[in-house]
Amino acid sequence: MASSATGAAALGHRPRSRHALTRLHRDRPLWEAHIIEGVEDDRFALYVKTHHAMIDGVGAMRMLRTCLSSDPDERDMPAPWNTPRPKRQSVPSPDPTGVMTATAGAMGGVLKFASAVRQRDKHGMIAPFQTPLTILNGRVTGSRRLVAQSWSLLRIKKVAKALNATLNDIVLAMSGGALRRYLIDQDALPEQPLTAMTPVSFRPADADVEGNSFSVVFATLATELGDPLDRLRAIQKSMGEAKRLLKGMNSAEIPIFTSIVALPVLVPHLLRLSGRTRPTFNVTVSNVPGPSEKLYWNGAPLEGMYPLSIVTHGQALNITVTSVGDSLDVGIVACRRSVPSAQRLIDHLEEALVELERCAPAG
């Protein structure tokens, strides 16, 4: 059975794989929630699953934030499924001239993207389908494996600062190192580097002080490189080239550019070819910003929030992370058949982080 397009988040406790095995009922609202009692140390967990047609990761994070408080004494906080609905705002009719101008600008970005791909070296600008076929990219079943773990955010920021990298660079480098070790264990490491599809947040050329925008880029994970520092630098170069291209666009051009570039990802799914042909990318690695302050729900402290995204035919593994307070929470979802022993990835992520720490200058 193919995976349904769902997203989930577990608060306060690591999630259980059985919750991800069932499809959401199509004759009911496309969400469900499970309260998990009896967790050790007198704790409880909340597992929320929603269809991606309803909400994305950033939207889900905002929704969960509205039902949490920074005040441990506050009570009568709503459940996530009972938060106040925002008022609908009227959407102005689009200006045809503006749409045409934005489309022309986005097409210019696509041409620049294609030119950069043609002129790239091994770890430069990455385009869809420039990726090897791996065990991560076959057809999936309905069986799932959910894995979660937390790391000290201070620890990861420390190594990022020492290596002149961003937190997202370190997350990608950890993922690349972990996948390299995992595929070696499975005797399935390709000679070509794996490619990650990763959402990015950046400031458009016409943004105001508070403006933000999101797009997706394809970045190398440099899994063919054994040296962790070389792998990190290759990832930084690949991400840097993609971000430089996007920064020159305005807020009207970015969504059109993203839609055009995403077509090679969507078309194989529409034609039911995903998992049967060369993949558009190997794995999704997503970093969803979370709350930085200590939060509570009716006095109960939030101790962890583990984001779990989707797997589909052609992409049998998904790695999503979020920062909550002083920790980085990682959620991994995989097809059990295509990605056996996915729990080993947690150990490999730690090993990859230790390797990067050893590369950091002393002092």
Image: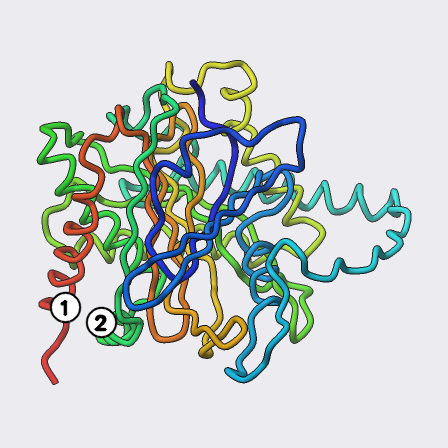
Residue 166 visible in the snapshot = no
**Residue on which the image places disc 1:** 357
Q: As shown in the figure, which amino acid type bears the numbered disc 2? A: Val
Vertical arrangement, residue 109 with respect to residue 355, above or below: above
**Relative image position of residue 255 (x, y in whole percent):** 65, 46
Q: As shown in the figure, which amino acid type bears the numbered disc 1? A: Glu
Q: Is residue 356 left or right of residue 314?
A: left
Q: Are marks 2 and 1 in contact (CB under 8 Å)?
A: yes
**Residue on which the image places disc 2:** 159
Tell me if mark 2 has few (under 14), some (14-19) or many (20+) residues whose alpha carbon lies within 10 angstroms of its own. Answer: many
Residue 274 visible in the snapshot = yes
**Relative image position of residue 321 (x, y in whole percent):** 38, 56
* Distance in Å between CA atoms under marks 2 and 1: 6 Å
Q: Quadrant of residue 131?
A: top left
Q: Quadrant of residue 137?
A: top left
Query: Secondary structure beneath disc 2?
Result: helix
Query: Secondary structure beneath disc 1?
Result: helix
Which residue corresponds to the image point at 15% horizontal and 51% vertical from the top-left? Answer: 347
Which residue corresponds to the image point at 45% horizontal and 75% vertical from the top-left? Answer: 292
Q: Is residue 255 left or right of residue 330?
A: right
Count of numbered badges drawn on the protein:
2
